[in-house]
Amino acid sequence: MLRGVLTAIMYLAVCLLGQAQEQPNMLFFQDNMLFYNPAFTGTYGQMASFNNRTQWAGISEAPVLQSFAYNRDFRNKAAWGLSFQNDQIFIEQRGTIAADYNYRLELGSTHRLYLGIKAGGYFTSIDKTKLFRLTNTPNNALDAVRNYSNPLLGLGINYQTNNFHLAAGVPNILNSKRYKESEGLLTTATDRPNLYLSSSFTVAFSESLSLTPALLYRSISDAPNFLNLQLSLTFKEKMLVGISKMNNDYMGAMFLFKGMSFIDIGYAYEFSSNRNNRVLRANNHELFARIKWASKSPTQRVTPKKNSKETKEIKEN
């Protein structure tokens, strides 16, 4: 059974691999996987989350990414959610709004397979008035640059146990092209699928301490592939500290406080280890908050416990 599940995940990864434009990343990716893969919808339980990422601290018009999500927990093996993202850098602003649906297949008492789908749309607006120009003479090339919007459709698969997950997802499988012509000048823009692979496993040293290695891999065309390796320690299921190493000369550290029953609050700091590039040395900050309801579904963050009553509650949920 496990072999068949892993084969299905790899098959989806091969089928959905394609050229893509870069999409924004988050240091708290383990708690925001539903933005990369709809098969994580509902696996965090019923919750509302907010993530704010500011890059290149101290630089005017630097990138800012704001993400919001609301998820219901699983009812009759299905869960749904809504998500919104606003990504802004200099004169360009890109927004995404989507609805997600996730279905759970029970492969055993602790083994589950999730199949998710995402549907929605995105828009891109370009404020040309913010451009610094040496002259006010009309420019036909600028006139050809227009705002645009397109639908999106995403797919994902996620194999998960109480202490392990392996998943593949594409937030938007549509290959969209736009052509705009203005006074003989033609501008084009293309959006192609992005492939995300993720995995993590949890090792419990005791009832109060656990270690979780995790990775997020993004494969795209015409741009470097992205890899984020993360290692986190969880204390008594109330506090998490972690470090990240990325293949873009960045490193990160994070802290997540989960001691309150209704809310999780986290902060992450990202910095460049490349001393030869002054631009990349600008640091990034990330804030994360999650409001939790009483119900809870199993996630990749859960520390495994040998408790038959807990296993029964998870299965019924």
Image (spheres, helix red, strand yellow):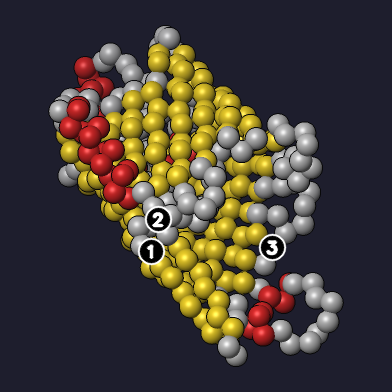
| Real-space Cα separation, disc 2 to disc 1, in angstroms | 7 Å
Q: Nearer the viewer, residue 310 or 92?
A: 92
Q: Earlier in the sequence, mark 2 or mark 1?
A: 1
Which residue position holds label 1?
Answer: 175
Looking at the picture, which amino acid does disc 3 mark?
Phe
- Mark 1, residues whose alpha carbon is within 10 Å: few (<14), some, or many (≥20)? few
Say which residue appears at 60% left-offset and 77% top-offset: 145
Asked which quadrant contains residue 129, the reply is: bottom right
Looking at the picture, which amino acid does disc 2 mark?
Pro
- Mark 2, residues whose alpha carbon is within 10 Å: few (<14), some, or many (≥20)? many
Say which residue appears at 72% left-offset and 34% top-offset: 274
Which residue position holds label 3?
Answer: 90
* Nearer to us: label 3 or label 2: 2
| Observer able to see residue 73 | no
Rendered view: 148 above or below 163 = below
Circle 1 SS class? loop
> Is the Cβ of the residue at disc 3 closer than 8 Å to that at disc 1?
no
**Residue 61 located left or right of residue 255:** right
Q: Earlier in the sequence, mark 3 or mark 1?
A: 3
Say which residue appears at 42% left-offset and 51% top-offset: 194
Tell me residue 248's x, y (percent): 61, 38
Circle 3 SS class? loop
Which residue position holds label 2?
Answer: 193
